[in-house]
Image (cartoon, rainbow, N blue to C red):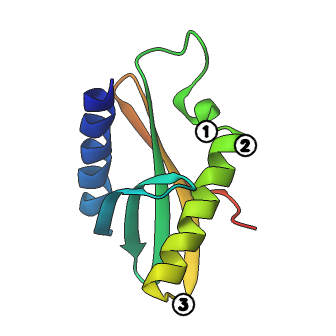
Amino acid sequence: MRLKGFFWEKVSGIYLFLKGYSILRFNYRTRLGEIDIICKDRDTTVFVEVKYRKNDKFGSAEEFVTEGKRKKIIKAARQYISEKKLEGNFRFDVVAINRFKIKHIKNAFEGE
């Protein structure tokens, strides 16, 4: 299962790179949570959650970014910002892959 996630995270990274994003890191992990991709969109640091679903029988990929998951991503992002002493603009995006269709959702949720 982790191999499949790794594959789709790399596909998403390539997708974002081709859209002009600079990839800073894959799979940032802390005891507070995990961030799949950290990248830059011009002057904005973007924390990206990648979700893949082979079908929508139980819902679309973006529906699986639950409130609990968002809270963990935000906590991990705060730690990353603190570690790197970052300032500036920050954003939380989702790359949802439903079957083989990629959907990039900018500002998918707030970090407050």
Q: Which mark is residue 23?
A: none
Q: Position of residue 51 (x, y in %)?
A: 46, 36
Residue 39, compared with residue 5, is above or below; it is below
Residue 107 seen in this snapshot: no
Q: Which residue is mark 2?
A: 67
How dense is the environment of label 3, judged by Cα within 10 Å: few (below 14), some, or many (20 and up)? Answer: few
Q: Residue at x 55, y 71 (%)?
A: 79
Residue 51, compared with residue 56, is above or below; it is below
Question: At numbered mark 2, what does the secondary structure look like: helix, strand or loop?
Answer: helix
- CA distance separating discs 3 and 2: 25 Å
Which amino acid is tagged 2? Answer: Glu
Q: Position of residue 7 (x, y in %)?
A: 24, 36
Quarter of the image with the N terminus in it:
top left
Could you say which is closer to the camera, residue 43 or residue 30? 30
Direction from residue 21 to residue 109 in the image, left or right: right
- CA distance separating discs 1 and 3: 26 Å
